[in-house]
Image (tube, coloured by chain):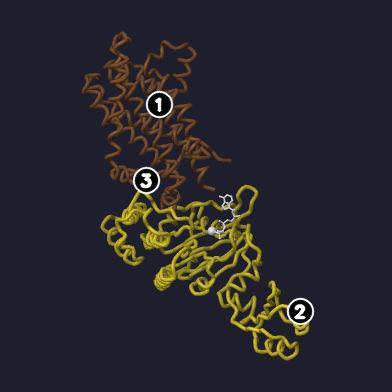
Chain colours: A yellow, B brown
């Protein structure tokens, strides 16, 4: 049996007029993976998701989902997809229950099956009590949960989630994480974007960091942290002598306002050097996180 | 370069979009049934029986009998035109309904086609409600006027398709007032509705016949309600079929250009 990657993108480009939103990205998503797209606002994450979903045509490059070309097999591909869009698009003309039922019809799911699955899914996202409530009467978080339930109505083989947990309370977020893990265990492939880097670190076994339409870094969360920063970060208060001292020991560091961050695999050695040789106080050491890499790679400036 | 006359790619899934709108319609049927029932009554009393008492017969028929088919034709126009402008715009822009549907196996062509068929259905429904009301006043010939019922679907599709083109190019929902005032209102007045086309200057008559779709719909419906169908019917029908096909295809492509980028 040939193993087909769920998504294969090669040199994928998307332009809007003159503007290049996705600038030649290549990646592969294998079955059962949880694949994350990280990046600042405007990096091109949603644009990439929309091309995978076959709702926005690619400008150039190759993009295959389940071995099928997104240009020629849209309907066949979309049959296997579950989509949680960044922008809520529930149908306000219908109640919670009706939203699920009407959506199931688009996938040719029979009424009896649809009722059963809807009950299960609403129960799962804990919206069964809101079954007959109109969409406008739901809170923001409830809407996000309903969108997740809706995305699962066709038992998708590939679930695409564009910022699934935005605006959710911690309980709901954990609920969704648990569900995503259980889906992953059932070999459902998951592609998600998020701005919560702890979420990405927890869920994803592979991720890419994008900026300005390009992929800057790719790997497992641990690999990415290790390759870009090392295991730890030592933070020292900034002062004229700090820079000299760090240059002395050829450390990899960055000055961020009145804090200096030293990237290292050996925090003990850095700390003792700073304490003994340079007589510096106020030193803290901590484990490096994905957030540190993110800021290091994409800069600290706010995006317009 | 977009090809505006590219043939839409459609399948039976079009009906799922139609069904979505039908479901919403049924949820609110009480509000939906009243206007098509009351509107002809208002016009008939004000124009047919009020103003009409000052008007001698037109082309050998009473004024009320003359305008009865126009009221039906206007209702065919209004039902689908307003459904596929303001209502479709709300679904497209504010409710993101189309975005949600194209994330499923349906494509944008099917979504728009479903909307157009739904618009035509609104015309059909309103005609079915309205026809008995007008018939009750003895203003139309039966049973030949029953042919208006299937015809109203075609007429509805004509106005739905034209309307959807405006929806596709409107920068915002208020801009839809332009076609409503500059296209629908002139048609309402100058398509042989409340007075015969023949009283207008020759050039205006040609204008009405070539670019005002309502003219053909009024002529078609009137020849049925008066029980005087002639070969002219075929000319009207041909005009309607050709223009409907053209605008149907055009509206799908304009919408695609707007929504898929
Ligand atoms: N339809 C469009 N027309 C023109 N430009 C667009 C369009 N959609 C997106 N862009 C531009 O493409 C770039 C990438 O947008 P995209 O939505 O993919 O970003 P993102 O990574 O999802 O950001 P965020 O984290 O804010 O959701 C942005 O500069 C945006 O302005
Ligand atoms: Mg986005």
What subunit carries mark 3? B
- Look at the picture and state if A51 lies above or below A180: above
B19 or A231, nearer to the observer: A231
Quick check: B231 left or right of A30? left
Quick check: A39 left or right of A77? right
Position in image of residue A163 (x %, y %):
49, 63
Q: Nearer the viewer, mark 2 or mark 3?
A: 2
Label 3, on which residue? B17
Label 2, on which residue? A243
Quick check: A30 left or right of B11? right
Estimate the spatial distance between the alpha carbons at disc 3 and disc 1, rounded to whole Å: 24 Å
Considering the image in quadrants, where does the N terminus of chain B appear?
Answer: top right
Estimate the spatial distance between the alpha carbons at disc 1 and disc 2, rounded to whole Å: 81 Å
Quick check: B97 left or right of A273? left
Q: Can marks 3 and 1 be said to lie on one chain?
A: yes
Q: Can marks 1 and 2 be said to lie on one chain?
A: no
What subunit carries mark 2? A
What subunit carries mark 1? B
From the Cβ of disc 3, is ligand 1 less than 8 Å away?
Answer: no
User: Crowding near pointer 1: few (<14 within 10 Å), some, many (20+)?
Assistant: many
Dot 3 or dot 1: first in sequence order is 3
Q: Nearer the viewer, mark 3 or mark 1?
A: 3
Q: Can marks 2 and 3 be said to lie on one chain?
A: no
Instruction: Check contact, mark 3 vs mark 1: CB within 8 A.
Output: no
Q: Nearer the viewer, mark 1 or mark 2?
A: 2
Position in image of residue A179 (x %, y %):
40, 70
């Amino acid at each position: 049996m040939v193993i087909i990657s769920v998504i294969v993108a090669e040199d994928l480009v998307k332009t809007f007029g003159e503007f290049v939103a996705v600038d030649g990205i290549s990646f592969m998503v294998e079955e059962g993976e949880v694949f994350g797209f990280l990046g600042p606002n405007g990096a091109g994450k949603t644009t990439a998701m929309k091309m995978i979903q076959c709702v926005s045509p690619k400008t150039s490059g190759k993009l295959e989902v389940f071995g099928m070309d997104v240009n020629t097999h849209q309907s066949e591909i979309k049959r296997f997809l579950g989509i949680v869009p960044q922008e809520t698009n529930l149908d306000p003309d219908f109640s919670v229950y009706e939203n699920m039922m009407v959506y199931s019809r688009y996938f040719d799911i029979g009424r009896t099956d649809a009722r059963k699955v809807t009950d299960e899914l609403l129960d799962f996202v804990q919206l069964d009590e809101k079954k007959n409530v109109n969409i406008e009467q739901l809170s923001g978080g409830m809407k996000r949960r309903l969108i997740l339930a809706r995305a699962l109505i066709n038992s998708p083989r590939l679930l695409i989630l564009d910022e699934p947990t935005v605006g959710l309370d911690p309980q709901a977020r954990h609920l969704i994480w648990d569900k995503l893990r259980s889906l992953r265990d059932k070999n459902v492939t998951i592609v998600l974007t998020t701005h919560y880097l702890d979420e990405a670190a927890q869920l994803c076994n592979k991720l890419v960091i994008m900026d300005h339409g390009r992929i800057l870094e790719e790997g497992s969360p641990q690999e990415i942290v290790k390759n870009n920063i090392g295991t730890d970060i030592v933070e020292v208060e900034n002062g004229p002598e700090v820079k000299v001292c760090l240059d002395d020991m050829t450390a990899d560091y960055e000055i961020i306002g009145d804090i200096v961050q030293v990237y290292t695999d050996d925090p003990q050695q850095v700390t003792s050097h700073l304490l003994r040789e340079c007589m510096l106080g106020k030193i803290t050491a901590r484990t490096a996180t994905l957030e540190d890499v993110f800021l290091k790679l994409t800069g600290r400036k706010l995006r317009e | 370069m977009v090809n505006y006359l590219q043939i839409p790619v459609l399948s039976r899934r079009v009906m799922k979009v139609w069904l979505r709108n039908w479901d919403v319609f049924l949820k609110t049927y009480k509000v939906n049934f009243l206007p098509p029932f009351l509107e002809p009554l208002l016009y008939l009393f004000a124009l047919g029986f009020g103003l009409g008492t000052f008007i001698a017969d037109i082309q050998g028929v009473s004024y009320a009998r003359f305008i009865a088919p126009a009221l039906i034709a206007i209702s065919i126009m209004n039902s689908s035109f307003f459904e596929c402008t303001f209502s479709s715009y709300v679904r497209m822009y504010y409710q993101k309904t189309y975005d949600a549907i194209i994330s499923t196996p349906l494509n944008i062509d099917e979504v728009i086609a479903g909307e157009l068929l739904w618009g035509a259905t609104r015309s059909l429904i309103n005609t079915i409600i309205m026809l008995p009301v007008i018939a009750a006043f003895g203003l139309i010939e039966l049973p030949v006027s029953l042919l208006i019922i299937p015809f109203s679907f075609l007429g509805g599709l004509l106005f739905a398709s034209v309307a959807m083109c405006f929806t596709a190019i409107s920068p915002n929902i208020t801009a839809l007032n332009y076609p409503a005032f500059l296209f629908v209102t002139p048609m309402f007045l100058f398509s042989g509705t409340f007075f015969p086309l023949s009283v207008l200057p020759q050039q205006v008559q040609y204008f009405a016949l070539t670019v005002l779709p309502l003219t053909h719909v009024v002529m078609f419906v009137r020849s049925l309600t008066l029980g005087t169908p002639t070969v002219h019917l075929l000319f009207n029908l041909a005009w309607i079929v050709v223009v409907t096909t053209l605008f149907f295809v055009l509206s799908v492509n304009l919408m695609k250009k707007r929504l898929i980028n």
